[in-house]
Amino acid sequence: MAAPKITNIGNIRNELNKYKKGKKFDIHQFNQIARLAWLGKVVMQPLDPQDAECKSFLVYVQEPEELAAHFLNTDQELTGAMHIVDGEQAEALIQVLRSGVEERAKLYKDLSSSDFYFRYFYQPKDEAGARDTAANPQGRGED
């Protein structure tokens, strides 16, 4: 097997630098990916953790569930694919991802302590009496 000839090292360095810098999404694309990041549908990893100068991230964007997909209308070319994202946008996505995890965890914690039975079926006696009085202020039975 023949090895490819390297004719211009400058071109290779330029290509490598493009990858190291990553790509900036436009506003529309970033918002779509940020929504999916909030839902926890984004997996991120530093592009080159051993290179201190490389700030870009490798980002995999998962498909949302059907209910979320119905409302989010995410571009198909963004989901199910890997992207190399520049450091600034990657840091913002990390903050969105963290915020989404924290807010969903709070929602689940509140949900686990919610008492639906008492909310719908228990009425303290003073509230029940106040309702009866409001419905029939004279205290008489209905005729």
Image (cartoon, helix red, strand yellow):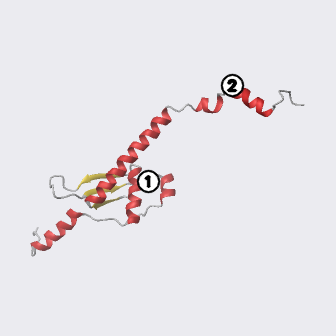
Secondary element at image label 2: helix
Disc 2/disc 1 C-alpha distance (Å): 48 Å
Q: Position of residue 122 (x, y in %)?
A: 64, 27
Does residue 5 appear in this view? no
Does residue 53 appear in this view? yes
Residue 64: image tag: 1
User: Three-letter amino acid code at disc 2?
Assistant: Asp
Camera-nearest residue between 64 and 17:
17
Q: Position of residue 50 (x, y in %)?
A: 15, 52
Q: Is residue 13 left or right of residue 46?
A: left
Q: Tell which circle, 2 or 1, labels the residue nearer the N-terminal end.
A: 1
User: Three-letter amino acid code at disc 1?
Assistant: Pro
Q: Please name the residue that numbered disc 2 is placed on.
A: 126
Label tally? 2
User: Which residue is found at the position 48% from the left and 53% from the top?
Assistant: 68
Quarter of the picture containing the N terminus is bottom left
